[in-house]
Amino acid sequence: MSQSSLRVSIDDLREEIADLDSPEDRIAYLIELGQTLPELPKEYQTEEYRVLGCQSMVWLVPKLQGDKKEGGDIEFRGSSDAPMVRGLVAILLAAYSGRKARDILAFPVEDFFGEIQLKSFLTPMRSNGLHSMVQRIQAIAKGALLLDVSPSSQPQEIKPARASGYRVTLPAIAIENCRDDFPILSEKLPCGKPWVYLDNAASSQRPTSVLDAMNRVYRTHYANVHRSGHQLAAQTTQAMEQSREALASWIQADSSEQVIFTPGTTASINLVARSWGDANLRPGDEILLTEMEHHSNIVPWQQLAERTGAIIRWLGVRDDFHLDIESLDRLLSDRTKLVALTAVSNVLGTINPVREIVDAAHRVGAKVLVDAAQSAPHGKATASDWDADWLVFSGHKMLGPTGIGVLYGKRELLESMPPFLGGGNMIKSVSKQGFVAADSPHRFEAGTAPIVEAIAMKPALEYLMRVGSEAILAHERRLAQRAIDGLSSLSGLRILGPSIQSKTGIVSFVIPGVHSDQIGQYLNAAGVAIRVGHHCAMPLHERFSVGVSARASFYFYNTEAEVDAFVTATLRSSEL
Ligand SMILES: Cc1ncc(COP(=O)(O)O)c(C=O)c1O
C-alpha cells in the first residue's frame, strides 16, 4: 500500500475535518476513515508489530522501499481492533507513509494535529495512545537512518508526567484559625461536653477541604481510572495523577512515576519486603532494624527473614531515648542488605538523624527504607534530603483519608522490582503464555485503586503546606511541654521520650502503681481521647521494661485548654 492509494491526503483531512462542527461528528468521521484502511493480514497482527502504550490493539508494519543506502521511502501498513483507532492509524499513514526517514522525523506532527483539531475531541488516554504510535513511527524512522528498519525498536510507553514543582498558591492558614475547618472537633459528648482528641499519632482528623473533595468526586465526576476512555474516567484519572504529582513534588521525587499509591505505610513496607526482599535476600544476609520501630516496620522483615534465611539485627535505643548511633558502624557490614528505620518514633516522638543513618548504610552498600508515617504529618518526608531508597507514609495520619498511602522508591530500584500483586492495571499486555508488567507506578498498583482517597491526598497536603511544618512542630511542642509540666507533680512519673526540642508532640508516660488502662478509661469518661497500650511497639516497651504506656499525641489543631483538660483528668485518674 502506498500513500497514493490512501483515500485521504493530508490536505483532504484538513479540509474535511474543518467542516465538522461537533465532537460527535468528528468521532463518526474517524470511524468512517478507519473503514477505508485496507485489511492488515493476520500474520502481521503479532506482538512484534504491536504498538505498546495504546489501550486497544494497534499494529504498525514498516517496509523500506527502494535502495536503503539511498535513504529509501518507508511505507507503513497498520490497523487496530478499535474502529476509531483505525481512523487514527489512517491519519498517521496519510501523514507519514511513503516518506523518507528524514522527512518523517522532521514532520511537524503536533502542528498538524493542531490544524485538524485532533486532540480537542480525544480523551487523554486516546491522546497517549496516539503519541505512542507517533513515537513508534519515529523510532522506525531513526532505525532506518541507521539502515535498520527492524521493528524491534519499540517506543517507550507514555509515562505519567514528571513532578512539576507543585506549589500551593492558596493563602497560609494561621493555627489559631484552623479549628473551624475540622467539623469533628466541635462534636460533643452525650453530656454536652466537647471531645478532646489527643490520639493524633494513631490517626489525625480531616479538614472540610478533604471531606468536600471526596464528596465532590463521588457526586460529580467519579469513574474508574486508567481504563475507560470516556470523559468522566479522563477527569478522574487526571485528578488522581495531579494528586500523585503534588505528592511527588512535596517529597522531592524526580518524577511522579516514583510515587506509588498503596493502602498505607504497612502495605508499602510489605510490598518492598515481598518484591525487593524476596528477590534480593539470601541466607545469612542481614537486615538492620531499630528498637523503636512500629510493628509494621518489624513484622514484614521478620517474615522476610523466615522466608529467606536472612538475619535481623537491632540498633538499640539509649536511656536518653535516642538511637545508639555510636553502635551503627559495628552493626553495619557488607552482609547488611537493608536498613529499615522510622524517621520519628510513634511512642517516644524522637526525631531520628535519618540522613546520617542512610549515609552510613549506603557506605556498606545497604538499601534504606524510611518509615515517615509519624514524620509526614509534621511536614517532613523528603526523599532527596534523606537520600532514602524507599520512603513510606500513610494519608490518614496527615489529614488525608484512610486506606491510602505512598511508597516512593528510587527509580532504578522500582525498575528492578518485580510486581507484588498481579491483576488488572499493572500490565502492558497479557497472553496465554504470560504477561508483560507495566512500568512504575502502575506495575505496583494492581486492581482498582482507592481512587477518591488518592485524589483527596492533594487537598490534605495543601492544608498541611498552608499551615506550614515549622508552625505545626512549634505549636505541638508548646502543647507537649505544657502537658509534661502539668503532669510533673505526679510522683515517680516516667515520660518516655527525649527533651522537647528533639521530638514531636507525643507524650508517652507511665505512672508507677497506676495501670495505663485505668488512665485511659478515666480519660475516656472525661471526654479525653488518648491511647493506652503498647502502641504497636512491643520491643520498645520491653527495652524500657514497661509492658504498656499511656500516650497523648498533640496536633496543630489542639489547644492549651485541651491540654489542661487532659492534665486535670490524668491527675485525677492517678488518685483513684
Ligand atoms: C511509625 C509508624 N509506622 C507505621 C505505622 C503503620 O501505619 P498504617 O497503620 O497507616 O499502615 C504507624 C501507625 O501508627 C506508625 O506510627
Image: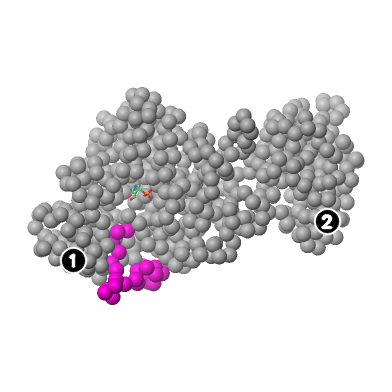
Q: Name the disc covering residue 569, or none.
A: 1
The x and y percentages for residue 473 are 32, 58
- Report the front residue among 566 and 68: 566
For ligand 1, tell me if the residue under mark 2 lies within 8 Å.
no
- Say left or right for 482 vs 343: left
SS for callout 2: helix
Q: Earlier in the sequence, mark 2 or mark 1?
A: 2
**Within-10-Å neighbours for mark 1: few <14, some 14–19, many 20+:** many
Residues in magenta, as a range = 172-200
The x and y percentages for residue 415 are 52, 35
* Vertical comparison of 43 with 193: above or below: above
Q: Tell me the quarter of the image containing the N terminus.
A: top right
**Within-10-Å neighbours for mark 2: few <14, some 14–19, many 20+:** some
Q: Hey, what amino acid is under mark 1?
A: Ala
Cβ–Cβ under 8 Å for marks 2 and 1: no
The x and y percentages for residue 74 are 82, 34
Residue furthest to the bottom in view is: 192
Q: Is residue 217 visible?
A: yes
Which residue carries the number 2 mark? 17
Chosen colour scheme: one colour
Give the quarter of the image for residue 64. Answer: top right
Q: Is residue 388 visible?
A: no
Residue at 63% over, 58% down: 232
Residue furthest to the right in view is: 4
- Say left or right for 510 vs 120: left
**Magenta run includes residue 197:** yes
Q: Tell me the quarter of the image containing the C terminus.
A: bottom left
Residue at 52% over, 50% down: 449
* Vertical comparison of 180 with 342: above or below: below
